[in-house]
Amino acid sequence: MTVETSPAGVPAPRDAGPNSDVDRPGGEDGGERGSQHPLRRHRTSTLSAAELADVRGSLSPSRAADFKTCPLLYRYRTIDRLPEVPSTDQVRGTLVHAVLEKLYELPAAQRTPAAAAALLQPEWQRLAEAEPAMAELFTGDAAADLDGWLASAGELLDGYFTVEDPQRLEPAERESLIEVVLDTGLRLRGFVDRLDVSPAGDIRVVDYKTGGSPREAFEARALFQLKFYALVLWRTRGVVPRSLRLLYLKDREACDYSPDADELARFERNLGALWAAIERATAARQFPPKRSRLCDWCSHQSRCPEFGGTPPPFPVPAEPESAPVDPAATGVGDLGAAG
Ligand code: SF4
């Protein structure tokens, strides 16, 4: 049975369940996609029962990045589990990802811009039926906006074809769950948009970005996400990915980055330290707001002290409050300092 611990004394984080989706509001692509991602086909954990039994805590790139960005945002999303209404930009990102996913199901010769455009409407209908919250964005007075919004999604797909030729690619995996339990008991998991593997075994991690400016505000978060995936792949497959590729569809630009083992080892230590910090914050129930440009995209300004709001009471603990907080007992409180 999975031992899936949350920070002591609080409800389990929403991405802590053994088979739960990890892509939440403000998902792995910098807040572009919505919750309960309909693309995620492999929600069931890939870990064995023995591996799951060793789990002492769980992080996805989204939740880790949330805490780094703003501890209060992490609290609202992971501990309070406050709902977030998806934005049209987020849903457009989901739609474009869905179309690209479908596009690669076609024989290579049929992966044309026209084929991608033809997938837009049916994929939108599928998503809207799967997630009514998406469809509700285009009801009432907003119904007239749907055609223009679909056209803007089509422009992003056009952008895709300027940075890659899908007829020349045969991805090894798409929308794939990758996860690992580190020696410390910290489970890392996330969904990669695409994995390419060369005949020589070189791995390239590819992530589609559909957001617009200010890109720099999301750049660090995007790189953090890709390093997270690279670390998981290194630990599960024994190979450091040769390349991490960000495809900015709006800017029509590809950014490639090559990690090395030393860097990923440092990153692993940093994640351990980050989890320890989350443990300490949870034990103290201290999640301070941290204002940044990303606040413009935050759904929680009305309850944020930085914007004159008041946080709701901390959620009722899942366990008796009298239970002592012992970081050592969690197995994640002493994972070492950042490298
Ligand atoms: S508005 Fe900004 S500071 Fe406040 S919770 Fe959201 S991200 Fe944090």
Image (cartoon, rainbow, N blue to C red):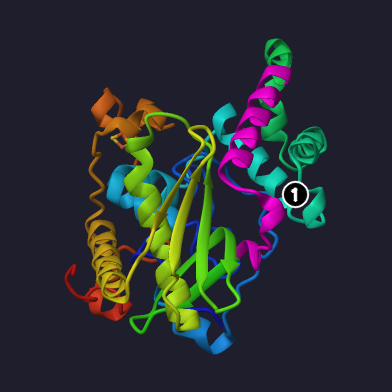
x and y, in percent, of residue 285 in the image: 26, 53
Part of the protein shown in magenta: 147-176
Residue at horizontal 35 percent and vertical 64 percent from the top? 9
State yes or no: residue 276 in magenta: no
Name the chief secondary structure element in magenta.
helix
Cβ of mark 1 under 8 A from ligand 1: no
Instruction: Tell me: 333 left or right of 222.
Output: left
Q: Quadrant of ligand 1?
A: top left
x and y, in percent, of residue 163 in the image: 56, 43
Residue at horizontal 79 percent and vertical 35 percent from the top? 114
Residue type at mark 1: give it.
Leu
Instruction: Tell me: 134 left or right of 71.
Output: right
Q: Is residue 100 visible?
A: yes
> Which is nearer the eye, 40 or 326?
40
Which quadrant of the figure contains the C terminus?
bottom left
Assign a secondary structure to mark 1: helix
Residue at horizontal 31 percent and vertical 43 percent from the top? 72
Residue at horizontal 54 percent and vertical 52 percent from the top? 23
Label 1 sits on residue: 103
x and y, in percent, of residue 292 in the image: 26, 34
The quadrant holding residue 258 is: bottom left
